[in-house]
Image (spheres, rainbow, N blue to C red):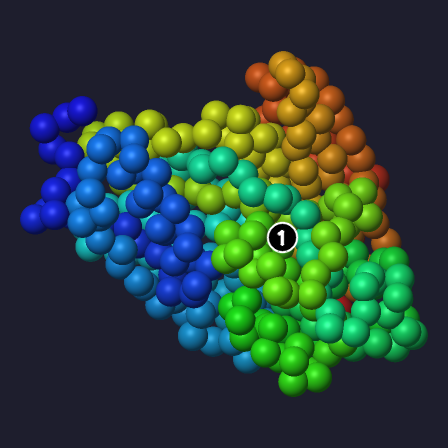
Amino acid sequence: MTDSMPTPAAPLRIGTRGSPLALAQANETRDRLATAFGLPHEAFSIVVIKTTGDRIIDRPLKEIGGKGLFTREIEDQMLAGDIDIAVHSMKDMPTVQPDGLVLDCYLPREDVRDAFISPTHSSIRDLPEGAVVGTSSLRRRAQLLNRRPDLNVVEFRGNLQTRLKKLDDGVASCTFLAMAGLNRLKMDEVPKTAIDTGDMLPAVAQGAIGIERRQNDARCAEMLAAIHHKETGQRLDAERAFLAELDGSCETPIAGLAVLDGTSLTLNGEVLRPDGSAAHGGEISGTIAEGPEMGRALARQLLEAAGPGFFDWHGT
């Protein structure tokens, strides 16, 4: 342990969004660091940062700047020295970090599956023709319309609690959330059905928490190395290489999941047209060390199958 460990008088500042899920993830990070270094909770300060993506919830993300809206302002505060580390849902993270920042610590991954949420139906198959489905995810929208083009998919933004209230208010018959978020918030009362990854491949890095730091911060580098989960990092190295090669953003429906088996890794990926009218999927296997190159290779394979203009968006 270095001489510069945080203390109650000079706590380590953990930056996070302010939603209940984001706070749960920040608390988990604090708890793991406190345990690893024998520190009291008072040696950490959780700093809530309200991002543009949290403030503007009545418009699709692609209209107001994309997925980076959930991370950029937090990163700006870290670069300015206002916080020491930042806790992120990895499925929200762009594949390239700003100069001066590093993302190399991941906590153990939670359940990667999507959850079907409805007070009246138990699965996608049970939905009647023309049923209204609420989701803010272009990936889920495309996957749904690819399998059930008869459904009416509407925009459904906001944090987990906001979306559940919209469901209770009858805005839609069902919605989708990540099982990981429901588990982390211990929301056992939510009427949910976990969707097999073979039926709905999840977003890249779904269920994973990443912790970002300044590149030149030796104290934080040492502390985060102690709580880094190697297997989650190996899986995300492959998935995020796949996403990066596809130039993925919240405007491109992309799904990907890496699974470890001993020293081998298998990566499944899917790209879809935004309106769900076509989809291309594939699988690649190799050693764990080959994961990033496998991700890039699978991306190139799917791009070739899809052809130019595949991701062009003509909807609203």
Secondary structure, mark 1, is: helix
Q: Residue at x 42, y 51 (%)?
A: 25
Residue 302: which quarter of the image? Answer: top right
Q: Residue at x 10, y 28 (%)?
A: 3
Q: Locate the N terminus and report the quarter of the image it occupies.
A: top left
Residue carrying label 1: 179
Relative to 170, say whether 50 is above or below.
above
Q: Residue at x 89, y 62 (%)?
A: 125
Residue 300: which quarter of the image? Answer: top right
How crowded is the residue under tag 1: few (<14 C-alpha within 10 Å), some, or many (20+)? Answer: many
Relative to 283, say whether 129 is above or below.
below
Q: Locate the C terminus and report the quarter of the image it occupies.
A: bottom right
Q: In screen coordinates, is 190 left or right of 46? A: right
Q: In screen coordinates, is 113 left or right of 165? A: right
| Amino acid, disc 1 | Met
Q: Is residue 89 visible?
A: yes
| Residue 170 rendering spot, x and y as whole percentages | 70, 84
Q: Is residue 78 visible?
A: no
Q: Residue at x 66, y 77 (%)?
A: 167
Name the foreground residue: 110 vs 147: 110
Relative to 181, say whether 275 is above or below.
below
Name the foreground residue: 267 vs 225: 225
| Residue 186 rendering spot, x and y as whole percentages | 53, 56
Name the foreground residue: 226 vs 242: 226
| Residue 153 rendering spot, x and y as whole percentages | 76, 72
| Residue 171 rendering spot, x and y as whole percentages | 69, 83
